Image (spheres, rainbow, N blue to C red):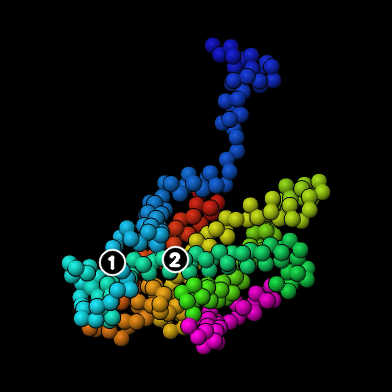
Amino acid sequence: MSDPSVTQDLIHGGEGPAASVVSASNKPRSLWQDTWDILKRRKIFWISLTMLVLFLLMAAFPSLFTGKNPDYATLAKSMEPPSGEAWFGYDLQGRDVFARTIYGARTSIIVGVLATLLTVVLGGIAGVLAAYYARWVDSVLSRVGEIFLGVPYVLGAIIILGTIAPAQSSPDRATIMAVVIVVLAVLGWPILMRIARSSVIQAKHQDYVQAARALGAGPFRIIFKHLLPNSLAPILVYATITIGSYIGAEATLSLLGIGLREPVISWGIAIADHTSYIRTGAHAMLFPAAFLSLCVLTFVMLGEAVRDALDPKLR
């Protein structure tokens, strides 16, 4: 026999507790809910997330991992190998390599995150404007982006940083980091502009955007209320991977002698200062290089995990 309450609900147009259960089960799920359900079942996501939390703790609270001063130098211990006293040994100036590796995480991650945020702002604004207004706005922004894309990344950074560096007499740490962050973002925004432009073009032809325009919504409301929220997925994936790319780029520029420099503490500087001592004191370079590689790999794995979860073909 059927449940009387269900029969009564159907007779009265679906009102009542049974109807609420049916409507709740048929409630559409959002993209981010589906994405989270996929991510939490994947080991690569939890591995990369665990490593990310570890690196963020290292950057935010380095004193939790070491009680030594990374700037304290004892020349008598120059290039001593790893030991119980100094797990990673000492560098050329007699500074503890483990302490400098831990504190170096802060600088490298800050540069990667801030450069990525600036890239997202520049590329996102340019991409949204190009896609929404199209015509001459799209043509101008696309041509400007192509000019920047035509410049080899490392070569462009060498030219810009090589021009700026001599003009700085004795810059502080914040100034040195700010210059590198701006240069990375200026050279990297065109790719994100293309991603944002493509996403917004797809979104602006959807029915809900046309309905909002028909109801009299202005460009500002349409862009921030309808277009951007529905175009964030590919931007988020690219931004996550870009953080790792920028951390690696900072190390490359520092290795070439045009990126970060003393008194800043970073993995790139640690590697650059000891490349000539690979045979006699490899530990001073290999440990920072290992942490750098793991950090870059963490962001790349996390970005790929999110990308796979957002890809409808892989669901």
| Residue holding disc 2 | 109
- Element type at mark 2: helix
Q: Residue at x 58, y 30 (%)?
A: 24
Q: Quadrant of residue 144?
A: bottom right
Q: What is the number of callouts on the image? A: 2
Separation of disc 1 and disc 2 at Cα? 21 Å
Which quarter of the figure has residue 152?
bottom right
State the image coordinates of residue 55 (x, y, percent, origin top left): 38, 60
Q: Nearer the viewer, mark 1 or mark 2?
A: 1
Vertical relation: 5 (above or below) 217:
above
| Dot 2 amino acid type | Ile
Q: Is residue 185 magenta?
A: no
Residue 187 found in image quarter: bottom right
- 252 or 315, nearer to the observer: 252
Front residue (pair 26, 302) = 302
How many other residues sit within 10 Å of disc 2, few (<14), some (14-19) or many (≥20)?
many
Q: In the rendering, which numbered label is found on residue 68?
A: 1
In the rendered image, the quadrant that contains the N terminus is top right
Above or below, comparing residue 226 to residue 20 in the picture: below
Residue 192 in picture, x, y percent from top left: 59, 66
> Mark 1: few, some, or many residues within 10 Å (few <14, many ≥20)?
some
- Of the pair 81 and 298, the residue shown nearer to us: 81
The magenta-colored residue range is 142-170
Q: In percent of the image, x 22 and y 69: which residue is there? A: 86
Magenta residues, dominant SS class: helix
Secondary structure of the residue carrying tag 1 is: loop
Under mark 1, the amino acid is: Lys
Q: Is residue 7 found left or right of 184 in the rendered image?
A: right
Residue 151 covered by magenta stretch? yes
